[in-house]
Image (cartoon, rainbow, N blue to C red):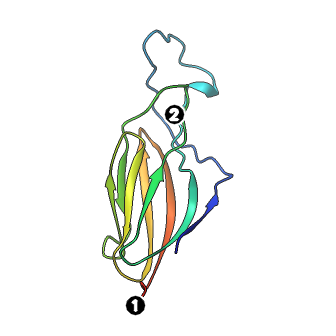
Amino acid sequence: MHGAVTRTLVLLGASTVLLPAGCTSTSGPDRIPKVQLEVETATLAVGDTLQARLLPMLPPGYVPPVEWSSSNPTIAGVLATGTLTARVTGLQAGQAVIHVAGEGARDSLRVTVVPGGP
């Protein structure tokens, strides 16, 4: 069993700005990297996995390097599987927060792991 709620809030926190090739301006809101997950909460059973995905970021096409971590890796583990994705695995019943951060921007996913079936 797993479900998700669509995120409606963007979290910003970048203090440094890297520009894509050919970009010369460092001003304007479209130059601040954003890191935003598709969902903010998820429930999964012990042994189940969930693919966590980042939404497209600004400036268009720009992907900052990100790091994934779990607030409680004995409850839910996380492993990067691509530039914008990570696999979250329910390890034992409980709650954990999956964090993703890059270039001063960050977001999180609250994960509830429930006991598995028989």
Q: Secondary structure at mark 1?
A: loop
The residue sitting at the front extreme is 118
> Residue at 63% across / 28% down in the picture?
29
The residue sitting at the bottom extreme is 118
Q: Earlier in the sequence, mark 1 or mark 2?
A: 2
Q: Is 80 in front, or is 103?
A: 80
Amino acid found under the numbered disc labelled 2: Pro
Mark 1 surroundings: few (<14), some (14-19) or many (≥20) residues within 10 A: few
Left or right: where 22 falls relative to 58: left
Instruction: Between label 1 and label 2, give the one nearer the viewer.
Output: 1
Q: Is residue 26 above or below residue 12?
A: above
User: How far from the left and from the top, in percent, is residue 65?
Assistant: 36, 37
**What is the number of the mark on residue 33?**
2
> Residue at 54% across / 38% down in the picture?
34
- Mark 1 lies on residue: 118
Q: Is 102 in front, or is 89?
A: 89
> Residue at 51% across / 61% down in the picture?
109
Q: How much space separates mark 1 and mark 2, taking CA atoms? A: 45 Å
User: How far from the left and from the top, in percent, is residue 67?
Assistant: 35, 48
Q: Is residue 88 above or below residue 29?
A: below
Left or right: where 34 falls relative to 84: right
User: How far from the left and from the top, in percent, is residue 38?
Assistant: 56, 51
